Amino acid sequence: MGASSWPNDSELDKIKKAVADMAGGSLNVVKVVVSSYRICPLGANIDHQGGIVSAMTINKGIILGFVPSTDSQVILRSGQFSGEVRFRVDQIQLPKDTTKSNGKIEKSQNHPSDTVEECKWGNYAKGALYALQSRGNNLKQGITGFICGTEGLDSSGLSSSAAVGIACLLALESANNLTVSPTENIEYDRLIENEYLGLKNGILDQSAILLSSYGCLTCMDCKTKKHKLIHPPKFVTDKDSESKIPYKILLAFSGLKQALTTNPGYNRRVIECREAAEILLKAAGKEDEPILTNVEEEEFETHKPKLELDLARRAEHYFTENARVIKGLEAWGCGNFEEFGKLISASGLSSIQNYECGCEPLIQLYTILLKAPGVYGARFSGAGFRGCCAAFVNSEYAEEAASFVKSEYFKLQPELASHLNKDTAVVICDLGDCARII
């Protein structure tokens, strides 16, 4: 593990005390799951097509304190939301849009927790149970837990949902003495999001959170599921000289918050990519799964005229983004942050022009960041339908850049900016580490 500055002792003590008060026990027996948020410098919106992606975690995220229950009951409270989530691990969990009647699984219009808005976050814990059960794990031990995320950063495009799902998985596995590898938990979290919640995303988010290592760029081939860690020059990751790290991560928030599970734009883009792949594969005389990784770039160039303009743009984004990832890994390994930043900004532009995600406030933030002093490169963080933009910035200019972005964004979006906390409207972050129990 590296020198991540998060969470600090005060944050850990606060979580442990909350759990001890809930369970009526000692602080010493409370375990804590740390599940960092992630950014994806390169590899935007191609994980669901089997592309190559890059990611790293930051020193912000989800903390879940817990103790095993005396029975199968799960009791969870949140630092961000009111209400209490309760369910039993010895009861079968079904996907969000199904219910069971007379022994038959049927479609349902409502999920039990949807009746209480504040407790929707509990779906991730129930989804963790569903994922574990669906692969034959027989859980008997519940947990009593308290979960909270870094203030102001929830629903922000940093994959807080995956971080919550992974935290719940690790806690339930620990309480039931299950030994589960990171790659297995990548699949379990995919089941939470794809099957239980109905989101058609890939495996980038959970891979980043579970596989990252302090100071490294995580590279994941989403088709083969193979990953590697790219180390920059040694001085960058020297934990005893953290001040020498030449960059910071800047997060600039738009004020827009909407879960991807309620935004049709994300799933629509995934469907469009598959439609493009299906047409291209058919034209090439191939019968592979209709995802763009199964299409050779030469086949795309040859048969591109057969695609409608929108589908051609989606495929164009996939192939150019895949190429940017490969170039970016080399730049990172050489410590060439200027080139790395240019590729990130090009990724952001392709997301706007070819993938056609984003909205006016996010595009404005992206444009402002590119003008900010010391910024190497920027793009949307997450899918681009809400949340924030992420940028790499020269460490010496981080404070100046943050101030510039706050000022310029307020001029363009005074209404949205007025709802942002002035202390978290633009956040300067350091590197993080993988999800773990401490």
Image (cartoon, rainbow, N blue to C red):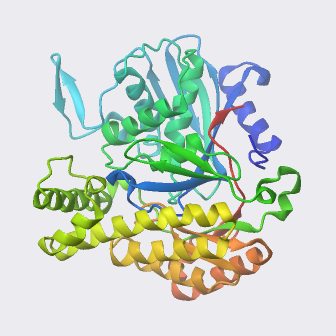
| Residue 94 sits above or below residue 397 on the image | above
In the image, 211 versus 415, the foreground residue is 211
Residue 430 image position (x, y, % from top left): 72, 58
In the image, 387 versus 316, the foreground residue is 316
Residue at (74% x, 45% y) in the render: 7
Q: In this view, does 334 lie to the left or right of 223?
A: right
In the image, 13 versus 166, the foreground residue is 166
The quadrant in which the N terminus is found is: top right
Residue at (43% x, 66% y) in the render: 323
Residue at (11% x, 57% y) in the render: 282
Q: In which quarter of the image is residue 76?
A: top right
Residue 345 image position (x, y, % from top left): 52, 76
- Is residue 422 among what the camera can see? yes
> Going by the picture, which residue comes out furthest to the right?
240
The quadrant in which the C terminus is found is: top right
| Residue 94 sits above or below residue 288 on the image | above
Residue 88 image position (x, y, % from top left): 44, 19
- Is residue 154 among what the camera can see? no
| Residue 436 sits above or below residue 353 on the image | above
Task: Give the mark count.
Answer: 0
Q: In this view, does 345 lie to the left or right of 235?
A: left
Q: In this view, does 371 lie to the left or right of 136?
A: right
Residue at (66% x, 52% y) in the render: 60
Residue 414 image position (x, y, % from top left): 54, 83
